[in-house]
Amino acid sequence: METAARRGALAVAAQAVARRLNADTSDYASPSLPCPRCGGPARYAGRHAKTFTTALGPLPLTRAYYPCAPCAQGFCPRDRALGVEGGSLSPAVTRMVGTAAALVSFAEASELLGALAGLPVPAKQVERTAEALGIETAEDERQQVVPAAAAEIAPTMYLGLDGTGVPMRKAEVDGRPGKQADGSSKTREVKLCTVWSAEGRDAEGVPVRDPGSVSYSAAIERAATRDTDATGSAFAQRVEREATRRGFERAPRQAVLGDGAPWIWNIAGEYFPEAIQIVDRFHAKAHLSDVAKVLYGAPSDLGDAWAKARHAELDAGQLHQIVAALAAQYRARRDPAKRAEVRKCIGYLWANRRRMRYPAFRAQGLCTSTAVVEAGCKVAIGTRLKRAGMHWTVRGANAIIALRCCKLSGRFEDFWERRAQRCVGS
Ligand SMILES: [Zn+2]
């Protein structure tokens, strides 16, 4: 009864809206209008019918139609006013598609829209719509850089930088060097910037991330700035925008967290020279565990015990003891691959030693690892883009990443408000 009544009520509402819109013929303004593509005159050719998919169900509308002969394409002024130009989904349905596709796969989003809203939107249409919407949110992110209000800036602000590989379609990685046995690559690196505060403390007094304080911005794009470049790399500019929006560089105390990757510290040093640099403890430990795997093979109790001892030394800030343990390994091993791994790890510890003063950071009440950055990669990228059978184009991945970051950062509502205003304004 419930379901049938809902369906009936929606159908009645759809009829009422269709009647009202179809009775209003004010979208016929004059016998000829300038074509939005070429600017030439497009002559009125009667009212054309089209059925749109709306939150109320199918909505048959007739609209004034102006074909342009040179462009071999026509337009309906009402479609633009209603925000349905070039498609068949209403703004409310487009928003539902965006919400679902930001969270789950296109096929699952299609299924959810059918099951929850009774809307038939095939997976292919979900994909097309979500991708177009994602490109809009990406553009919106570049345009909307309103500096944070002073009240929104915590005494200590954190900025995390990280990269994660996303599986790509073959054509998108052809000729790119990678980690496959034959030197090819199956993935492209998504670079992620996340900003948060951690004023709260847990029972042991350790800073914990403030709920709702996390924002994300990410894309597959270049992070390194060449000496000849007049502006920063695309990713460096993204980081700057996010930092401005969150008031990161205006916070009394700033910390940049990342793994050991040089591009991270290049951006941190160049754009936020005041910020304290911290190697995310989670990453540093993962790095030592990887070394243990190379030395002892995995799984191995000996290797696990070795890694555990190094993790404890890391927490205690005893980097020299870690180096001593690595040097002992170097002397004991003959395998060149294992020796190389040990040498690399010593280099990593040396290069990042000032970023691993964990006891000092703790004493200053700084957050050194809540695995926020790593979790950010999983939440913002992994759970949506790195699922079995998924293969992306750069364009498609960047669109869905933009859509997802917009949603996860609490900017989706504002985006829709601006979008609706654009329709009204045009
Ligand atoms: Zn034209």
Image: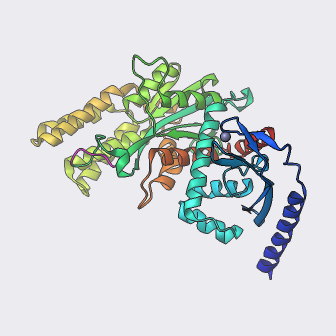
Which residue is depicted at the point 56% across and 63% down? 123
Q: Is residue 201 visible?
A: no
Q: Is residue 376 above or below residue 103?
A: above
User: Can residue 108 be found in the magenta stretch?
Assistant: no
Q: Quadrant of the N terminus?
A: bottom right
Residue 263: percent from the left, percent from the top?
A: 40, 29
The answer to whether 163 appears left or right of 93 in the picture is left
* Residue furthest left in the image: 334
Which stretch appears magenta? 182-187
Seen from the viewer's position, the closer of residues 43 and 109 is 43
The answer to whether 149 appears left or right of 363 in the picture is right
Q: Is residue 233 above or below residue 58?
A: above
Colour setting: rainbow
Q: Is residue 110 above or below residue 144?
A: below
Q: Count the marks: how many?
A: 0
Residue 159: percent from the left, percent from the top?
A: 54, 33
Residue 286: percent from the left, percent from the top?
A: 36, 45
Res. 264 image quadrant:
top left
Which residue is depicted at the point 67% across and 32% down? 144
Seen from the viewer's position, the closer of residues 244 and 168 is 168
Which residue is depicted at the point 31% across and 45% down? 174
Res. 345 image quadrant:
top left
Residue 212: percent from the left, percent from the top?
A: 66, 44
Q: Is residue 188 visible?
A: yes
Seen from the viewer's position, the closer of residues 68 and 101 is 68
Q: Magenta stretch: dominant SS?
A: loop
Which residue is depicted at the point 54% across and 64% down? 107
* Residue furthest bottom in the image: 1
Q: Quadrant of the C terminus?
A: top right
